[in-house]
Amino acid sequence: MQQELNKLQHEVHRLENTTAEIGDDIVSWCPVQAVIVRYSELRRQLDRMKKDHIQSDAAREDLKLKVQQQEEEIQTIQQPNDDLMLIQLKDEVDVLAKSNNKLKDCTIQLETYMKRLEEYNDLF
């Protein structure tokens, strides 16, 4: 028993003090496998993220094109609308100008009639 214990302690001491190559013994093999598995998982995750990034970029470019097309459509539609609004505003200005001229004429006529009425009242 004592010999077996000494042998195991000597083996532990040897393993602690030696710089063995990774994978040379059973003790270091399990951590290496874990590292390889973790590396593989991270690599797959990185590949998925790259694929998602490419898809996101493509979707973003598609949306940019759609936005540009819609902006062009808005301008195309809005131009006739703006023209119609301008025509309508000009028509309203013309109507108001005519009304203003009529008002001036009526005011002048009213003043004329008021003067005549005063003259007529002065006669009686």
Image (cartoon, rainbow, N blue to C red):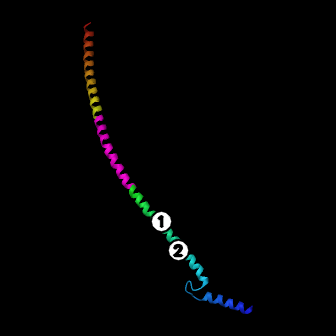
* Image quadrant assignment for residue 31: bottom right
Number of disc labels: 2
Query: Disc 2 and disc 1: Cα gap in Å?
Result: 15 Å
Q: Could you tell me the amino acid type at mark 2?
A: Tyr
Helix, strand or loop: magenta stretch: helix
Category of crowding for the residue at label 2, using alpha-carbon neighbours closer than 10 angstroms: few (below 14), some (14–19), many (at least 20): few
> Which residue lies under the disc numbered 1?
49
The image's mark for residue 39 is: 2
Which of pointers 2 and 1 lies earlier in the amino acid sequence?
2
Q: Position of residue 89 (x, y in %)?
A: 30, 35
Q: Is residue 98 above or below residue 19?
A: above
Residue sitting farthest toward the bottom? 3
Magenta region includes residue 34? no
Name the residue at 34% across, 47% down: 73
Q: Position of residue 63 (x, y in %)?
A: 40, 55
- Image quadrant where one finds the C terminus: top left
Given residues 19 and 102, the one toward you in this image is 19
- Image quadrant where one finds the N terminus: bottom right
Q: Under tag 2, what secondary structure?
A: helix
Name the residue at 52% across, 74% down: 39
Q: Is residue 16 above or below residue 89?
A: below
Using residue 63 as the reference point, say whether residue 33 is left or right of it. right
Using residue 64 as the reference point, say whether residue 123 is left or right of it. left
Q: Which residues are magenta?
A: 63-89
Q: Position of residue 97 (x, y in %)?
A: 27, 29
